[in-house]
């Protein structure tokens, strides 16, 4: 009886092995896959575009100009001196300074002026375009606007020359407009003795003062 029972057990085991049931019952333990590690994306640090230097300290100083130039006027710009467009663009503060060179023997009179305006940083592109368009739209047949090549003084730069081509005694005027951070500047040189290279050097000095 026991012999028959043993034979029956052997037959059952063989049948289970053939059908793969034993491998299912005694399967090897599964090895868990390593959990994926998500690397967080670094968040870029936002650089504050606002200048940190008082607007009066950005102005050209007498020592920045060649000898012979005299300070004529320098002052803060009043809110009442601005127009509605400037106010809508977020004008915050301004400063202006003017120097002149006078030589009575040579009938020479030349002025160098600088205007500095602070705006809301987000509007600087619009500020530059509006100011540039207001200048280029003033060109006429006898007094055209000639755009000049100029090194970059900041985020935007525009330089031009103007003068009455029909009048041999008219004054030539050079101007450089530029923006840097939240600052808009226009530096102008006009008169009987003008020097665009000098104006570019002064504009670079002014740009370097914006911190």
Image (tube, rainbow, N blue to C red):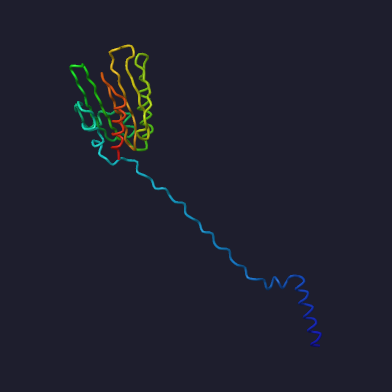
The C terminus, quarter of image = top left
Residue 111 drawn at (x, y percent): 24, 23
The N terminus, quarter of image = bottom right
Residue 37 drawn at (x, y percent): 51, 59
Taking depth in this image into account, of 150 and 98 the one nearest to the observer is 150
Residue 68 image-quadrant placement:
top left
In the image, residue 139 above or below residue 20: above
Residue 154 drawn at (x, y percent): 35, 35
* Residue pictured at 60% horizontal, 67% vertical: 31
* Residue pictured at 47% horizontal, 51% vertical: 41
Residue 187 drawn at (x, y percent): 29, 28
Residue 27 image-quadrant placement:
bottom right
Taking depth in this image into account, of 67 and 81 the one nearest to the observer is 67
* Residue pictured at 18% horizontal, 16% vertical: 105
Q: Is residue 129 left or right of residue 33?
A: left
Residue 130 image-quadrant placement:
top left
In the image, residue 159 above or below residue 209: above
């Amino acid at each position: 009886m026991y012999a028959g029972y043993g034979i029956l057990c052997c037959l059952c085991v063989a049948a289970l092995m053939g059908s793969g049931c034993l491998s299912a019952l005694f399967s090897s333990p599964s090895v868990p896959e390593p959990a994926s590690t998500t690397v967080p994306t670094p968040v870029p640090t936002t650089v504050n575009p606002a200048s940190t230097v008082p607007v009066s300290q950005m102005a050209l100083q007498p020592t920045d100009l060649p000898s012979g130039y005299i300070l004529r006027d320098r002052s803060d710009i009043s809110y009442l001196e601005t127009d509605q467009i400037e106010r809508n663009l977020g004008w915050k503060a301004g400063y202006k300074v003017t120097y002149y060179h006078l030589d009575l023997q040579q009938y020479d009179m030349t002025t160098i002026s600088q205007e500095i305006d602070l705006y809301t940083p987000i509007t600087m592109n619009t500020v530059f375009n509006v100011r540039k368009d207001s200048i280029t739209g003033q060109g006429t047949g006898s007094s055209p606007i000639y755009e000049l090549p100029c090194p970059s003084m900041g985020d935007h730069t525009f330089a031009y020359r103007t003068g009455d081509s029909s009048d041999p005694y008219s004054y030539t005027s050079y101007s450089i407009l530029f923006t840097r951070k939240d600052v808009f500047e226009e530096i102008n040189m006009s008169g009987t003795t003008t020097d665009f290279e000098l104006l570019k050097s002064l504009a670079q000095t002014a740009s370097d003062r914006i911190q």
